[in-house]
Image: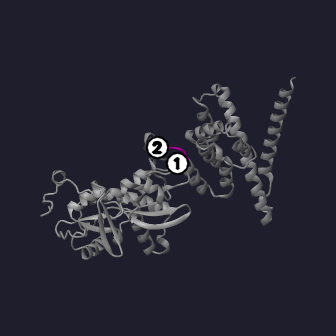
Amino acid sequence: MSHPRRIIEHMFATVGELLERSKAFVAEFDFGALERDGSRELYEQLVELERLAAAAKGLAADRMADSGAWWRTPYRSPAHYMAACEAKPVNRSAEMLHTVDKMHELPEIESAYRQGALNDEQAMEVVSAAEAAPGIQEYLLSVAEGEALIELRRECARVRAAALSEKERQSRAHNSRRLRHWVDPDGAFRLSGRFTVAAGAEIMAALEPYRQRVADRASRRGRRGRISPGAALADALVELSHRSSFGSQDPMRPPPRASIHVRLDHSALVRGHTVSGEICEVPGVGPVPVETVRGWMKQKDAYVAAILTDGDDIRKVVRVGRDIPAKLEMALRERDQCCVVPGCGEVYDLQVDHVVEMERGGPTTLYNLCRLCSWHHYLKTHHRYILRRRLGHWLWEDPGGIPPDLDDLQQELSAAGYTGSLPRAG
C-alpha cells in the first residue's frame, strides 16, 4: 500500500471517529449543568470547530467538483448536489464553490480559512474583494478579524468599487438586474431583487418618507404599536404602491419628498470620478458612480444631501440640487432684485445660477446662489465667463479679455430661447 493511500485512509478514520464522538457529545452532554463562564467558553470553542468543519467541507466540495464525483449523483451540478445535502439555496452553494476555487490563488486567505479564522460569509466577502485587489489580502483579513460582518461587507464593497471602473461596475450590476416574486409555504408574498446601487438608492429614498410615516403612526400608538424596521419598510412599500394605484389624483395629499443622502470625497465630485482611496456611496446601500450623483444634482426635483469629505475628515454637509426651497428662493429674490452683474440692472425674467457649479461641489445655499438675466446666465454657462464675489461685491470677468461677437451671440441666444436684444455700445 502506498504512503499517500495510508494517509488518506487514516484521515477518513479520523473524520469518522470525530463524527461519532460529536454525535455522542451532542446527544448525551448535559448543557444545563454548565456554569456561566463555562457555557461561554464552550460556545466559543464550538464556533471555532464549526469554522474548521466548514473549511474542510468547502475544500472537499471543491475537490468533488473538480474530480467530477458529483456525476454519480442524480443532480445536474455540484452546486445542486451541495444544496440538496445541506438544504440550502443553489445559488448559495454555487457562490461557496466559486469562493473556494478562487481561494487557491490567494494563499494568505486560504491559510486563514484552513485555520478557522473565517466563516463562510467572511470568506466569500474577502475573496470577492481580493479578486479585484490581490495585494491587500492581509488588510482584508484584519478587517474580518476586527469588524462586524456588516462593516466587512461595506469595506469589501469599497475595495471592489475602487478596483473596477465605474462603467464596468455599473454594467455588471445592470446586466444582472432582476426582480422575482413567489408565495412561500406560509402563504406570504415574497420579493427578491437585484439592482444597480444607484437604482437601489433611488428606491430606498422613495420609500424612506413613507417608512417614516409608518414609524410615526406606530410610535403614537405606544408600546403596543411598535413594529420592527423591516415591517415598517414593508408597510411603506405597500403605501407607496397603494398611492400609485389609487391616490395619484388627490391634490390635497401630495406624495412625501424623497431624499437621497450621499457620502463622497470633494475631490471626486470636482474631478468627476473616484480614484483609489476615495469614496462615493449612499450610506446603507453602497458605492455609486460620481456621474450618477451629478445626474441627481441636475434633476429639478432631486433632493440630494451630500457629506463632502477630505480623507477621513468631514469637510462640509450640504444640500445639492437645482430645485430651490421656497424660503431660500424668497431670500434670494429679496437680496438680488436685479441681475447681479455690475452695470446690467435687468429686473425681468431673471434666472437662478450657482456661482460655483454643482458639478464642482457648489452647494445650493444663499451664499452660492445669485440671479442673472438670461444673457449673462448664458455667457457664464456656455462661454466660460466668471462671476465672483469679493467683500460683498460681485465681479464679472470674461474668459480672455476679448469681447464676444454680439451678432453671433444674438443668434445663439435666440436659438436658446432668449428673445431680448443684447446691449450695444453707443
Along the line of sight, which residue is nearer the eye, 63 or 29? 63
* 165 in magenta: yes
Label pair 1/2, CB-CB below 8 angstroms? no
Along the line of sight, which residue is nearer the eye, 123 or 338? 338
The residue singled out by tag 1 in the image is 161
142 displayed left or right of 317? right
Quarter where residue 6 is shown = top right
Density class for disc 1 (Cα within 10 Å; few <14, some 14-19, many ≥20) is many
Along the line of sight, which residue is nearer the eye, 195 or 26? 195
Place of residue 202 in the rendered image (x, y in percent of width and height, measured from the top left): 40, 55
The residue singled out by tag 2 in the image is 173
* 309 in magenta: no
Q: For the residues marked 1 and 2, what is the alpha-carbon distance in whole angstroms? A: 12 Å
**What amino acid is found at the position of numbered circle 1 in the picture?**
Ala
Along the line of sight, which residue is nearer the eye, 359 or 281? 359
Quarter where residue 260 is shown = bottom left
